[in-house]
Image (cartoon, rainbow, N blue to C red):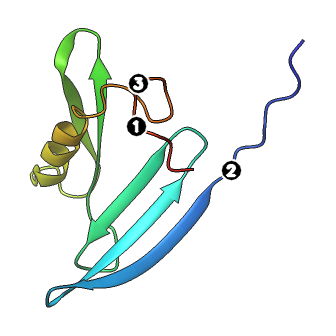
């Protein structure tokens, strides 16, 4: 018999760093089973996209959740990043978990 589910934990980290001459802002949100990373030149989120793998196609499906839908930069980046993790972190044969 399993015990009660663990409480969901969310940890937020906001910071800025100078890369060459450009000030870059970061927003990192660690959730129970995922990690959200936002990087931008302005300190606020303008576009947000998500990509998900599908059993019907080898190319992840992506869509814009926030911002201008005609700007496909974030959706394209999410789609490309969604193709890399073949084995989740912390799984046998995968990348080691960062936590």
For mark 3, does the 10 Å Cα neighbourhood hold few (<14), some (14 to 19), or many (20 or more) residues? few
Relative depth, front residue between 68 and 52: 52
Whole-number angstrom distance, CA of label 3 to CA of label 1: 7 Å
Q: Nearer the viewer, residue 46 or 16?
A: 16
Q: Give the vertical position of 61 relative to 56 (above or below).
A: below
Q: Nearer the viewer, residue 79 or 2?
A: 2
Query: CB atoms at circles 2 and 3 under 8 Å apart?
Result: no
* Residue 78 placement, left or right of 32: left
Measured Cα–Cα span from mark 1 to mark 2: 22 Å
User: Where's residue 30, x and y in %?
Assistant: 54, 53
Q: Position of residue 5 (x, y in %)?
A: 80, 30
Q: Which of the marked residues, 1 or 2, is nearer the chain's N terminus?
A: 2
Residue receiving disc 3 = 93
Q: Quadrant of residue 62?
A: top left
Give the x, y percent position of residue 79: 19, 37
Tag 2 residue: 9
In which quadrant will I find the N terminus? top right
Number of the front mark, 2 or 3: 3
Q: Which mark is residue 95?
A: 1
Q: Are marks 3 and 1 in contact (CB under 8 Å)?
A: no
Label 2 secondary element: loop
Is residue 83 rendered to the left or right of residue 96?
left
């Amino acid at each position: 018999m399993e015990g009660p589910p663990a409480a969901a934990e969310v940890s937020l980290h906001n910071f800025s760093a100078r890369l060459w001459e450009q000030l870059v802002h970061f927003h990192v949100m660690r959730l129970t089973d995922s990690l959200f990373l936002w990087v931008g030149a302005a300190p606020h989120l303008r576009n947000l996209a998500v990509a998900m793998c599908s059993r019907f196609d080898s190319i992840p499906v992506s869509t814009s959740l926030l911002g201008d839908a005609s700007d496909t930069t974030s959706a394209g980046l999410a789609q490309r990043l969604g193709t890399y993790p073949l084995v989740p972190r912390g799984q046998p044969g995968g990348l080691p978990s960062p936590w």
